[in-house]
Structures are given as C-alpha cells and as structure tokens.
Amino acid sequence: MAAIGATTATTKTTGRTLLALAVCAAAMTGCTAIDFSKPLPPRAASPVVTVTRDPETLPRENGPRITGSYPSFSEPLTAANAQMTDQDAVKMQHNLSALGHARRSGSISEAEYNRRVEEMRKLAAQHGAETQAEIAN
C-alpha cells in the first residue's frame, strides 16, 4: 500500500512540475510578444444609440421590406457592363504585339510609337471613369 501512495504522490509532483514549466514557457513567450514600453492605441469612441418607440421615425432602408412575396434567387445575374470576350482579348494582344514588333523592326518612328502608347494610356486612364459614370446612370 505504501508503494501505491508513493506512486500517486510522485505522479502529482510530476504533474505540478510540468504544469509549472508550461506556465513559465507561456509567460516567457508572451513577454517577448508584447512591448509594454509603448502606449496603447486610442480606442474609437462608442457610437451614440438613440432608442425611439415611434415606428414612423425608424429608418426603413436598412430593414426588411414587406412586399407580400418571397425573394427569388433563380434569375441569372447580369453584369453591370459587357465583359471583354476572348476574341477581343486576342485582337488586343495581336495589336499590341504588332506595335512592339513594328517598333523593334523600325517600320514606325519612335515618335509614332510614343504617340500610340500615349493614346492607349489616355484611353486606359479615362475609360474606367467613363464606364463608371455610364453604369451609374
């Protein structure tokens, strides 16, 4: 019986030792991860909450709309604008490759090459804003 009691005491001591080592290891890794010399960042102000009981003053654009029917998700989604087709991409790649080849071979002048490149950059810069305006209307 004494041997069983000694084994239990040894197991408890070993368990406590392992627990103490695990706590020390966790504390040591935590100390290197946090820099206490720097101040904490400021917290954002809490939002102001106003409770009203009058249903006429509640905003309706964020809540559910009661239409008398369930929404349907079976209709196919449509894009806001027509997407580039594979043929358009191949054509554009061919045109750009031809422009680069013409520059390398010397069949167009450097000024003509720069004019075409500038024209494409201008189109790229303006096209996005024009398309966004078209989509918005």
Image (cartoon, grey):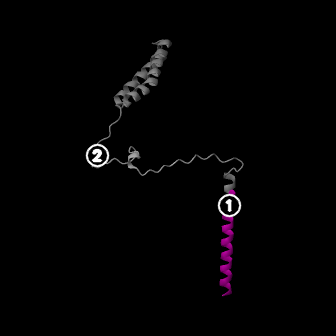
* Label 1: element kind: helix
- In the figure, is residue 110 to the left or right of 4? left
Name the mark nearer the viewer: 1 or 2. 2
- Decide: few, some or many residues near mark 2? Use Cα within 10 Å; few <14, some 14-19, many ≥20: few
Secondary structure predominantly adopted by residues drawn in magenta: helix
Where residue 3 sits in the image (x, y, percent)?
A: 67, 84
Q: Amino acid at mark 1?
A: Ala
Residue shown at the point (31%, 48%) measured from the top left:
66
Where residue 124 sits in the image (x, y, percent)?
A: 45, 24
Q: Which residues are magenta?
A: 1-28
Residue shown at the point (68%, 67%) measured from the top left:
20
- In the figure, is residue 90 to the left or right of 9? left
- In the figure, is residue 122 to the left or right of 11? left
Compared with residue 118, is residue 25 higher up or lower down, i.e. above or below? below
- Decide: few, some or many residues near mark 1? Use Cα within 10 Å; few <14, some 14-19, many ≥20: few
- Residue 74 circle label: 2
User: 2 or 103, which lies in front?
Assistant: 2
Image quarter in which the N terminus is found = bottom right
**Quadrant of the rendered structure where residue 98 is?**
top left
Where residue 135 sits in the image (x, y, percent)?
A: 37, 30
Between discs 1 and 2, the one toward the N terminus: 1
Mark 1, residue position: 25
Where residue 101 sits in the image (x, y, percent)?
A: 45, 19
Residue shown at the point (66%, 52%) measured from the top left:
33
Extreme bottom residue here?
1
Q: Amino acid at mark 2?
A: Ser
Extreme left residue here?
69
